Image (spheres, rainbow, N blue to C red):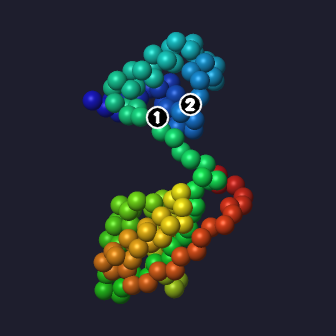
Amino acid sequence: MVDTNLNSIDAKIINILKGDSRKPFVEIANSIGMSESAVRRRVKNLQESGVINKFTVEMGPSNKTSAITLISVSSVADTSAVSDQLLKLAGVETVYEITGQYDIATVISAPTILEINSYIDEIRKIDGVSDTNTVIILRTLGNSK
């Protein structure tokens, strides 16, 4: 059973773990002014109560290929319904409903361009998608904050 009434200390621990799920408990403890054993106990309780389901690995940008796919939606189709379908597809990281020549922009990612291509094929199969234009992201500059 998930306890949605987290206290501020549990919330701090969770936020730290969201940023780095491998951060040592002693470092977490030092940053929030607790003992390592208290942090360890709280994380264990958060896991047992279902608040924390799993710890995951997020691969860095050098281990994936990303693309932006611009999508035109048929004039008789519901753009929001197309967006909802896009969010369910593998590889789709972000969906933007936009103005201009295209109705939707998506950011898709995969380990290889071949997989990106298969994701684009799935996008084109969605009812209401009338056209796509995809560009591969070669390099990301700037700050993502």
Residue 10, compared with residue 107, is above or below; it is: above
How far, Cα to Cα, is label 1 from label 2?
8 Å
Mark 1: which secondary structure? loop
* Crowdedness near tag 2: few (<14), some (14–19) or many (≥20) residues, C-alpha within 10 Å: few
Residue 89 percent across, percent down from the top left: 38, 62
Q: Going 50% across and 14% down the picture, which residue do you hit?
A: 38
As drawn, which residue projects farthest toward the right?
A: 142
Q: Going 31% across and 86% down the picture, which residue do you hit?
A: 76
Picture quarter with the N terminus:
top left
Residue 121, compared with residue 66, is above or below; it is: below
Is 79 on the left or on the right of 25, as rendered?
left
Residue that badge 1 annotates: 55
Residue 52 percent across, percent down from the top left: 40, 32
Residue 15 has which mark? Answer: none
Is 48 on the left or on the right of 106, as rendered?
left
Residue 98 percent across, percent down from the top left: 50, 75
Residue 137, compared with residue 61, is above or below; it is: below
Dots 1 and 2: beta carbons under 8 Å?
A: yes
Q: Amino acid at mark 2?
A: Arg
Q: Amino acid at mark 1?
A: Phe
Mark 2: which secondary structure? loop
Residue 58 percent across, percent down from the top left: 53, 45
Res 8 visible: no
Residue 2 location, quadrant? top left
Res 115 visible: yes
Residue 22 has which mark? Answer: 2
